[in-house]
Image: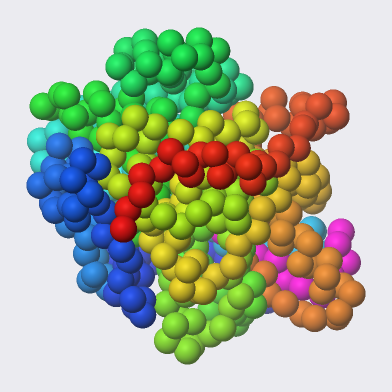
Amino acid sequence: MADPTKILLDESEIPTHWYNVVADLPAPPPPPLHPATHEPIGPDDLAPLFPMALIEQEVSAERYIEIPEEVREVYELWRPSPLIRAKRLERLLDTPAKIYFKYEGVSPAGSHKPNTAVPQAYYNAAAGTKRLTTETGAGQWGSALAFAAAQFALECEVWQVAASFTQKPYRGSMIRTWGATIHSSPSDLTEAGRAILAQDPDSPGSLGIAISEAVEVAASSPDAKYALGSVLNHVLLHQTVIGEEALKQLAEVGDSPDLIVGCTGGGSNFAGLAFPFLREKMAGRMDPHVLAVEPAACPTFTKGEYRYDYGDVAGMTPLVKMHTLGHDFVPDPIHAGGLRYHGMSPLLSHMYELGLFEAEALPQSACFDAAVRFARTEGIVPAPEPTHALAAAIREAEACKETGEEKVILTALCGHGHFDMAAYDAWFAGELVDHDYPEDKVREAMARVPEIG
C-alpha cells in the first residue's frame, strides 16, 4: 500500500544485536565510584547486585552485543513493534509535518520496559539467581520484570513508590498475576524504609527510596540479585531494539527524521529510540535534531547539576556522574510516576554535556492536553510519561503549519495509559496541578551531595 499508516516488520527482522553508543562517542563517560572510597569501581564491586554478564555489558565499549536466542524468542511475543504515522492527528493540526510514533504499548506489560526486563531475567537465570528485587514508579517497570521473571522461573519482589502504589492499584494486581510480590515504599521491611517512615510516616516515597529498599534486600540475600529498569548503560543498551526497528521502518517508506523527541525520566525510552539514530548522525548519514523532554516537577537535565551523586537515598549504590536534583530529592506526586527520579542516566548526562541532543521541561497540564488530542484522533490513550514527548511533537508540528516546513517528526509512545485513568479523571475535573521544582530546592539538595574532586 502506498503511503501506509502502519509500518510493520516481520518477526525475522527483530534485531539480532543491541547497539552500544559508547563505542562511537568522542570521549568515554566518567566511571562510577565506590560509595565509601570514592575510587573507580570494578566488576567485583557490582557482583553482589548483578550477574557478570550484565556487569560486562555495563562497562563494555563494544559497538554491537548479540541478543541471545532465548531473549529473541520472548521478544517474538510482541516485537517488532509497529511504527505508526499519526495521520489523523496531522489532519487535526492541519500541519504539513509528518508525525510518526513507535508504539511500545503492544508488549505484554503495555510499555517498552520488557525490552530490558527479559534479558535481565535471562542473564540472572543463567547465572543461577533465584530471586530478583527491584523498585518501580508508575508500575510499568515492576510489571515488566514480573512478566520477565515468570518466563524464566524466577521469584520477583517489587517496591513501588507509595504515591503510585495508591494511584495505580491495578498495576499491583498485574504484578501479582505474574507471580511477583509488591510492597508500598517506604515500607517497614527494610532499614532504609523504616528510617524514612520514622521521619515522615506519610511519605509519598520516591524512586530513590524504593531503590534503597530493593538494593538492601538483594545485597543481603545470597540467592537474590537486583534489577534496574532505567539509568544504567546495560538497560539503555537493551532498549536500542526500538530505534533499530524504527530505522528500518522509516527506510521502507523513504523517510528520515528531522526531529526525534522522547520523554526522559531515567532515560531508557529516550535512549532506546535515539541511540541508533545518533549513530547515523555521528557517522554523517543523517542529521536529525534530537530533543529530550522531562517534567517541570522533576527537571534533572534542565535544572539539575552535573556531578557525582548516589543513585539512591541511603547512599548504598555507587556514585555516578549525572544530572541530579540530589539523592534525597522527593518529587511532587505528579502522575508521570516513571519520570519522578532524582537523577538522569550517566551515559545520557555525558552525551548531553557533549552537545549531542537538547532538553526541555514541560508542565503536566500541557502534556495531558496533548494526550487527549492524540487519543481522540489516534485512538490510543497514552501513559502519562510519553505525553511529554507528544506535547513537544505537537508543538513542533503546529510550528510547521506557520512556516510550511514539511518536517518528519519521530517519537516513541512508550506505553498505554490503561492503568492511569485516575490521572485523566483529574485532568477532566480540572484538578491536575502543575508543579515547578524551584531553584532554591536544588541548591539545598546539592549541599547534601558528596563533593568529588
Q: Report the magenta residues as a range.
A: 92-102
Quarter residue 149 falls in:
top left
Where is the C terminus found, in terms of image quarters?
bottom left
Where 252 falls versus 221 (above or below)? below
Tally of marks: 0
Residue 98: x %, y % from top left: 72, 71
Q: Residue at x 87, y 72 (%)?
A: 401
Say which quadrant the N terminus sits in. Answer: bottom right
Query: Is 9 in front, or is 272?
Result: 272
Figure quadrant of residue 396: bottom right
Q: Is residue 349 visible?
A: yes
Residue 237 drawn at (x, y percent): 34, 59
Q: Is residue 346 above or below residue 366?
A: below
Name the residue at 53% across, 85% down.
286
Residue 402 sits inside the magenta stretch: no
Q: At 46% from the left edge and 73% from the top edge, which residue is drawn? A: 354
Q: Residue furthest bottom?
A: 284
Rendered location of residue 248, percent (x, y): 48, 73
Left or right: where 254 falls relative to 247: right
Locate residue 108 relative to residue 418 in the image: left or right: left
User: In this rendering, is residue 89 above or below 274?
Assistant: above
Question: Is residue 378 at least partly visible in the picture?
Answer: no
Compare residues 253 and 350 and report the one nearer the observer. Answer: 350
Magenta stretch containing residue 100, yes or no? Answer: yes
Q: Residue at x 51, y 14 (%)?
A: 200
Q: Nearer the viewer, residue 54 or 372?
A: 54
Q: Position of residue 345 (x, y in %)?
A: 42, 53
- In the drawing, does residue 264 fall left or right of residue 453? right
Q: Is residue 436 above or below residue 333?
A: below
Residue 241: which quarter of the image?
Answer: bottom left
Identify the image's colour scheme: rainbow, by chain, secondary structure or one colour.
Answer: rainbow
